[in-house]
Image (cartoon, rainbow, N blue to C red):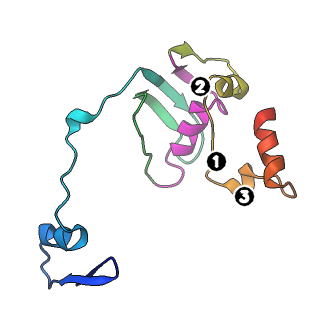
Amino acid sequence: MTVLRQGRVSGEMDAPFDTDGLMEMMFGEAPVPPSCACLFTGEDVLMMRGVSASGGRTGLRDCNIVIRQGEVVGLAGLEGSGQEVFLRIAAGLASPSEGEVRVQGMKMSGKTHHWFKHVGVSFLPGSRMEEGLVPGLTITEHLALLDFW
């Protein structure tokens, strides 16, 4: 393996690769990972307790999660494994058949997606061409729609 840094060869290595050596070639010195002690989270932003809903291949069954201010959450899995259902419920675009959803401590049962948006929840669809855009509108017109919705 040859490592280029800032347009110049900074080193070469044969397998098996030494991770620390590669990091030094790539960055000049091995970066020090941040300690977990520097992570501070705030108040609960989204809470789901016992949430179930149909949709996709598997739906969502008995989902329990608390997401706090400052946290970054990634959803992974095969398409249809419940991520889309989870996101739609979290944004108020779908209602759970069971369970409770709270946003910033406020019970959201029966609230419309307009209410979710009012309290700061936004939804960005994965299929932006099918759900996120209106054909024929300009970017400016799409932004105006955001204020309307």
Residue 148 drawn above or below residue 115: below
- Do callouts 1 and 2 mark residues in contact (Cβ within 8 Å)? no
* Residue 70 seen in this snapshot: yes
* Residue under label 2: 97
Q: Secondary structure at mark 2?
A: loop
Q: Is residue 82 above or below residue 101?
A: below
Q: CA distance from mark 2 to mark 3?
A: 29 Å
Q: Please state the horizontal and vertical placement of residue 7, each as a whole percent of the image.
A: 34, 82
Q: Residue at x 39, y 35 (%)?
A: 71
Q: Nearer the viewer, residue 127 or 6?
A: 6
Q: Give the residue at x 33% y 76%.
A: 6
| Residue kind at label 1, given as amino acid type | Pro
On-image quarter of the N terminus:
bottom left
The magenta span reads: 78-104
How crowded pointer 3 is (Cα within 10 Å; few <14, some 14-19, many 20+) is rated as few
In x, y percent, where is residue 58?
51, 44
Label number found at residue 129: 3
Name the front one of labels 1 and 2. Answer: 1
Apparent side of residue 52 relative to residue 23 in the rendered image (left or right): right
Residue under label 1: 125
Query: For the residue marked with disc 3, what is the amino acid?
Result: Met
